Image (tube, helix red, strand yellow):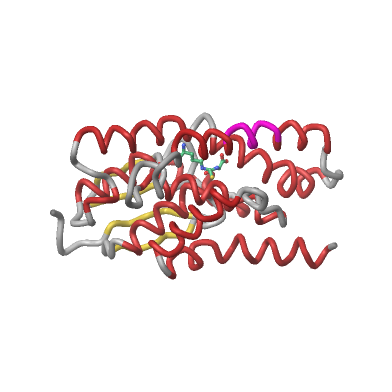
């Protein structure tokens, strides 16, 4: 276990993977310092940040000089390195493999499909000044629906969390992604009671860190409601 130092994390809480990292650090009480990198101001493209992460993306973690990118790798590193409760990333090989199974799947399913809905409803109209492209949105919603079906029928079949009886880093990555479209006023779990119950379980398990991480999403949602 590492002690007596702070993990530094470079985050923008409007970013889904950043929120997952933020929630784990808060819940597991890992001593850390947040350095905000405001994507909307282009702070991820400054020479200093580019030196840290040539991919110009957040999150980035620095632990005693060790620089790590990719939320999945950061979450698992933190769980391995620090004294965090074992359920976050179980050591038992089969249980750990279940977490790895979801997190591998996540980056080509839950993440792109939920992120695309947010992009089409919130970011694209803002950047272009044009109305929402309804055809593309409807295709994105259909892809997301297939992913949500699989979350229900495969990962949440017979268990309360995605990878078993307790919360893991997989649930954090998934829930932060599925909360993102709420920024445009869309609750993608609205007609999905099984997934709503899962989201409530995740929320209860992480306590106030959930709302703290999602404050920026709630603020966007409130702004999008005010426009209607
Ligand atoms: N696979 C990466 C994705 C990181 C990522 O795409 N970050 C976005 C914010 S959600 C970003 O920094 N985008 C800035 C850009 O691409 O210009 C992870 O999970 O950490």
Question: In the rendered image, which quarter is residue 140 located in?
Answer: top right
For the point 26% across and 37% down, the residue is: 96
For the point 47% across and 55% down, the residue is: 19
Nearer the observer, 136 or 150: 150
Quadrant containing the N terminus is bottom left
Question: In the rendered image, which quarter is residue 29 located in?
Answer: bottom left
Horizontal arrangement in the rendering, residue 53 relative to residue 114 (left or right) = left
Horizontal arrangement in the rendering, residue 56 relative to residue 9 (left or right) = right
- From what the image shows, is residue 140 above or below residue 130? above
Q: State the image coordinates of residue 54 (x, y, percent, origin top left).
A: 44, 36
Q: State the image coordinates of residue 115 (x, y, percent, origin top left).
A: 61, 41
Q: State the image coordinates of residue 92 (x, y, percent, origin top left).
A: 18, 39
For the point 19% across and 41% down, the residue is: 91
Question: In the rendered image, which quarter is residue 224 located in?
Answer: bottom right
Chain part drawn in magenta = 142-147
For the point 49% across and 60% down, the residue is: 200
- From what the image shows, is residue 113 above or below residue 123? above
Residue 137 included in the magenta stretch of the image: no
Residue 144 included in the magenta stretch of the image: yes
Number of marks in the rendered image:
0
Horizontal arrangement in the rendering, residue 145 relative to residue 108 (left or right) = right
Horizontal arrangement in the rendering, residue 44 relative to residue 72 (left or right) = right
Provide the major secondary structure of the magenta segment: helix
Q: State the image coordinates of residue 66 (x, y, percent, origin top left).
A: 25, 44
Answer whether residue 38 is visible to the viewer in this image.
no
Answer whether residue 42 is visible to the viewer in this image.
yes
């Amino acid at each position: 276990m590492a002690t007596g130092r702070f993990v530094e994390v470079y985050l923008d809480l409007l970013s889904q993977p950043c929120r997952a990292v933020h929630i784990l650090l808060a819940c597991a009480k890992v001593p850390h310092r947040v350095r905000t990198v405001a994507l909307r101001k282009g702070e991820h493209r400054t020479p200093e940040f580019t030196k840290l992460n040539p991919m110009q993306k957040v999150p980035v973690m620095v632990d005693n000089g060790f620089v790590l990118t990719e939320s999945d790798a950061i979450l698992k590193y933190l769980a391995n390195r620090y004294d965090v409760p074992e359920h976050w990333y179980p050591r038992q090989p089969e249980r750990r493999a279940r977490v790895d199974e979801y997190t591998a799947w996540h980056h080509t399913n839950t993440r792109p499909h939920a992120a695309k809905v947010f992009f089409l409803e919130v970011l694209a109209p803002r950047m272009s000044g044009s109305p929402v492209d309804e055809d593309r949105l409807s295709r994105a919603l259909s892809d997301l629906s297939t992913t949500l079906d699989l979350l229900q029928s495969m990962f949440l079949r017979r268990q309360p969390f995605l990878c078993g009886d307790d919360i893991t880093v997989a649930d954090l990555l998934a829930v932060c992604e599925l909360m993102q479209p709420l920024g445009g006023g869309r609750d993608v779990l609205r007609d999905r009671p099984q997934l709503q119950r899962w989201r409530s379980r995740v929320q209860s398990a992480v306590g106030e860190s959930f709302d703290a991480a999602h404050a920026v999403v709630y603020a966007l949602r409130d702004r999008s409601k005010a426009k209607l």
